[in-house]
Amino acid sequence: MSTEVQPRAAAAGRVQIAERTLRQDRWWLQPLITFAVLGAFVVYSTFRAFWGRYYYDDHSHLLSPLYSPCLSDRCGTAPHFSWFPTWTYIATPAIWVLIFPLGLRLSCYYYRKAYYRSFWFSPPACAVSEPHKGYSGETRFPLVMQNVHRWFFWFGLLFVGILTFDAVESFRQGASGQWGHMGLGSVILIVDALLLGLYTISCHSCRHIFGGRLRNFSKHPVRYRLWSWVTVLNAKHMQFAWVSLVFVALTDLYVWLVTANVFSDPRFF
C-alpha cells in the first residue's frame, strides 16, 4: 500500500460566506469605543482651536497645551513667540500649533490602526469583512504621506520640551512673576508633559533610532541599552497614546475654567 501523499487540488476561489462574520463575541465594541473617544477629542479640540479664548491665565501662568507655544500677544507675560508675524492672526494660535502634534498622532503607527478600523472599517475587527472592494495599503496618495511620521517625531520631542517649560513657568505667580509658588495647575501641566513625553519616547520611530540598521548589538552597547529601555516603553505605547490624548483635553479644560474665572487655581504654597 502506497503512503505517498498526493497534492491537494488548488481551490477555485475564496469561500463565499453570506454572513459578514461568524464571530459571536462583541467584536464591534472596541472599534465603537475608539470611534467615540477619538471623535469626541476631534470635536472638542476643533472647537477650542477655533474659539481662540481662555487659553492663558496671567495670574497662575497656566498655558493650555493646545495653544503652546504661544504665537499671540494675548498670552500676557507668557515668554513665547508673541512677536510672531501678524499675518498669522488670520487663524487662532492653536490652528498653527496643532499642525505638529496632530501630524504626529495622525501618522502614529498605533493611531493608524485605531482609526483605520473604527472610522474606515479597514477592517473593523479580525475575521470581519470590510466594505471596501479594493485595498492599496499605504502605497498611494494620500496614505503614502503617513511615512512623514519619522519627521513629526522630532517635532513631538520639541513640543514635549516646550510643554515642560510651560510647567516650570507655572511655578511663578502674578504680574511680578515671583518664583516659588505651586498650584494644582502646575501639577496638571507637569503630568501632561510627562505623559506626552512617554507617548513620544515610546514611539516606534524612537525605537528604530536607537536599534535600527544595526547588525550586531554587542558592538553598540550604549545603543542596545537605550533600545532596550525604549522597547519596554514601546510595549505600553497604546496605553500612553490614550492616556496622554485624554489628559491633553482635560488639561486644556482645566486652563479654560481657571482663565474664565469659574474657579481659582488652588495653591499649595
Image: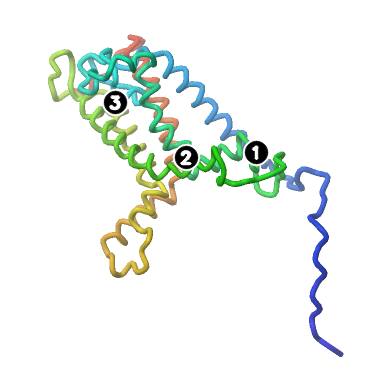
Q: Amino acid at mark 3?
A: Pro
Q: Where does the C terminus fall, quadrant-wise? A: top left
As drawn, which residue projects farthest toward the bottom?
1
Residue underneath mark 1: 121
Q: Where does the N terminus fall, quadrant-wise? A: bottom right
3 or 2: tag closer to the N-terminus: 3
Contact? badges 3 and 2 (CB < 8 Å): no
Q: Position of residue 236 (x, y in %)?
A: 43, 47
Residue underneath mark 3: 69
Q: Nearer the viewer, residue 224 or 255?
A: 224
Secondary structure state at the residue bearing disc 2? loop
Q: Position of residue 28 (x, y in %)?
A: 66, 38
Q: Amino acid at mark 2?
A: Ser
3 or 1: tag closer to the N-terminus: 3
2 or 1: tag closer to the N-terminus: 2
Q: Residues within 10 Å of mark 1 (few under 14, many from 20)?
A: some
Secondary structure state at the residue bearing disc 3? loop
Which residue shows up at 55% across the image and 39% down it? 141
Q: Residues within 10 Å of mark 3 (few under 14, many from 20)?
A: many
Q: CA distance from mark 2 to mark 1?
A: 17 Å
Q: CA distance from mark 3 to mark 1?
A: 36 Å
Q: Amino acid at mark 1?
A: Phe
Q: Position of residue 234 (x, y in %)?
A: 41, 50
Residue underneath mark 2: 107
Contact? badges 2 and 1 (CB < 8 Å): no
Q: CA distance from mark 3 to mark 2?
A: 21 Å
Q: How is the image coloured?
A: rainbow
Q: Give the label on residue 245, or none.
A: none
Q: Position of residue 113 (x, y in %)?
A: 55, 43
Q: Nearer the viewer, residue 60 or 213?
A: 213
**Above/below status of 9 relative to 164:** below
Of labels 2 and 1, the one closer to you? 2
